[in-house]
Amino acid sequence: MVAAIILLRHGQTDYNAEGRFQGQEDIPLNALGRLQAEAAAQALSASGIDRIVSSDLRRAHETAEALSAATGAGLEFDVRLREISVGEWQGRTRDEIAGIWPEELAAWFSGADMRPPGGESRRESSARVVTAIRDIVAAAGEDETLAIVAHGAVLRGAAEELLGLGREGAGFLGVMANCGYGVLTPRRDTWVLRSWGASSDPAAVA
């Protein structure tokens, strides 16, 4: 069994800064995001990471590359680690969405497991990412430390599912800030949450 999984959210993008729903649009890191990625990579450089698997979207890809450079760990990509698809909401601000889909947006922020128009639900995206993580863990060597680099919504949903919290009323964990990370360690048939939302205070290096 692996020693630990480190779940790392990507650095900031212009869409994050503008409050736009990003979904699976392939947006790169902005200047602050690149600084955040470097800071997180340095903070995790002594964590004994053996292998890094990242979403293939550029914002995660660039964050994972910084981590790979700092740790020397090999880097792979898995499309199943992409962010939740928010369909027609992608690229729009909350105000823009509220003007077209007010009821749907209210349901989204209430925590309801709904699908944005043309998108996927939280449960669907969490199941996709959990399957990917379980496959990655199953293929890992004994006592390896893995880093999964992905996106805020799906990392939270996957962590809750792995911890047995991914049922009705999910939302026990907060969405990590850009380049925040969490650590899970195995225990028999379940996982233990060692930390969540940890950060190297990357805004301080801006």
Image: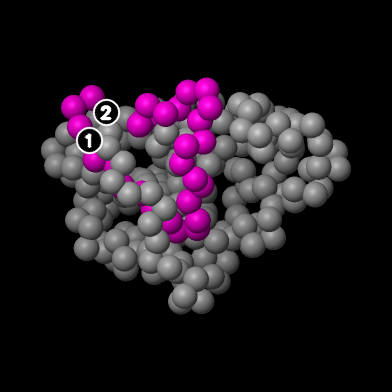
Asked whether residue 141 is in view, the answer is no
- Identity, as a three-letter code, of the amino acid under mark 1: Pro
**Which residue appears farthest toward the right when viewing the image?**
99
How busy is the neighbourhood of tag 1: few (under 14 within 10 Å), some, or many (20 plus)? some
**Which residue appears farthest toward the bottom when viewing the image?**
205
Q: Where residue 188 sits in the image (x, y, percent)?
A: 18, 27
Which residue is rendered at x = 32% and y = 30% of the image? 134
Q: Which label was assigned to residue 186?
A: 1
Q: Where residue 33 sits in the image (x, y, percent)?
A: 52, 65
Report the quarter where the N terminus lies. top left
Q: Secondary structure at mark 1?
A: strand
Would you place residue 169 above or below residue 33 in this image? Answer: above
**Contact (Cβ within 8 Å) of mark 2 with mark 1:** yes
Tell me the chief SS of the magenta region.
Answer: loop
Q: Which label was assigned to residue 190?
A: 2
Image check: 19 left or right of 201? right
Magenta region: 161-190
